[in-house]
Image (spheres, rainbow, N blue to C red):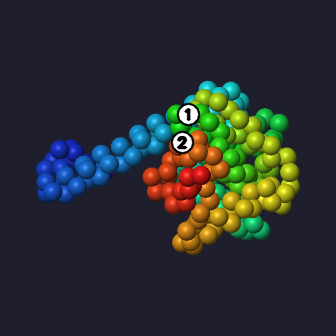
């Protein structure tokens, strides 16, 4: 029969620095676990609060989340969510937490690119962009090649930017320039006074 020593007797034999390292490692693991659980609940509550009665089958949880890839179109994406509804339909959801609640063309292009990439793994027929608490449905009822044609110019710009090229695409109105997030770094030629 094996004799078990009380835990305090065993711990008294372990050097203090080893105990400290083990305690810190356990504390760190606990913090990461709690943060992950809180983040997952917050994201799931976003889905529930916006009236989606669906199962989350994919969620971008950070660096360790697998990237969705369309080899045919050379598009990689990590949508915020892929949902599966009771009828078997799947939807891509992109969530924007910005304050102004505006839907931008870049949001629409992003969700379309995510749909193309996600279709390699899921049968995607719906797409939504959530801005603040507003849900915008994006029409993706097209074959992937037609969706790609709709976003092709932006994909080319993104690829050029990733390759280190300087992209000079500017807003067409002064009002849009005033609300642009990168206006301080803009290289738009200034208009000459008439």
Label 1, residues with CA under 10 Å away: few <14, some 14-19, many ≥20: few
Is residue 46 visible in the rendered structure shown here?
no
Tell me if residue 112 comes above or below residue 97 in the rendering. below
Tell me, for residue 100, which label it has, or none.
1
Is 58 positioned to the left or the right of 21 in the image? right
Q: Position of residue 58 (x, y in %)?
A: 64, 48
Q: State how many labels appear.
A: 2
Is 84 positioned to the left or the right of 49 in the image? right
Nearest the eye: 135 or 51: 135
Q: Residue at x 78, y 59 (%)?
A: 148
Mark 2 / mark 1, whichever is N-terminal: 1
Q: Which residue is mark 2?
A: 179
Is residue 109 visible in the rendered structure shown here?
yes
Q: Are marks 2 and 1 in contact (CB under 8 Å)?
A: yes
Q: Determine whether the residue tagged by mark 2 lies in a helix, strand or loop.
A: loop
Q: Residue at x 23, y 55 (%)?
A: 21
Q: Residue at x 76, y 41 (%)?
A: 138
Picture quadrant where residue 68 is located = bottom right
Q: Position of residue 150 (x, y in %)?
A: 79, 55
Alpha carbon distance from label 2 to label 1: 10 Å
Q: Determine whether the residue tagged by mark 1 lies in a helix, strand or loop.
A: loop
Nearest the eye: 47 or 149: 149
Q: Position of residue 27 (x, y in %)?
A: 30, 45
Q: Position of residue 73 (x, y in %)?
A: 75, 66
């Amino acid at each position: 029969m094996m004799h078990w020593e009380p835990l305090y007797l065993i711990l008294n034999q372990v050097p203090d620095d080893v105990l400290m390292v083990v305690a810190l490692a356990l504390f760190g693991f606990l913090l990461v676990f709690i943060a992950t659980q809180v983040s997952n609940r917050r994201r799931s509550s976003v889905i529930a609060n916006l009236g989606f009665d669906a199962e989350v089958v994919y969620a971008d949880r950070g660096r360790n989340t697998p990237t969705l890839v369309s080899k045919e179109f050379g598009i990689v994406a990590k949508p915020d969510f892929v949902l599966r509804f009771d009828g078997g339909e799947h939807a891509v959801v992109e969530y924007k937490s910005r304050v102004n609640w505006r839907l931008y063309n870049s949001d629409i292009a992003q969700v379309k690119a995510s749909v193309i990439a996600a279709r390699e793994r899921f049968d995607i027929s719906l797409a939504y962009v959530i801005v603040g608490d507003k849900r915008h449905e994006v029409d993706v009822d097209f074959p992937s090649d037609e969706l790609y044609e709709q976003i092709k110019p932006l994909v080319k710009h993104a690829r050029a930017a990733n390759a280190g090229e300087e992209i000079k695409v500017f807003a067409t109105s002064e009002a849009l320039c005033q609300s642009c997030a990168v206006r301080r770094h803009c290289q738009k030629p200034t208009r000459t006074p008439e």
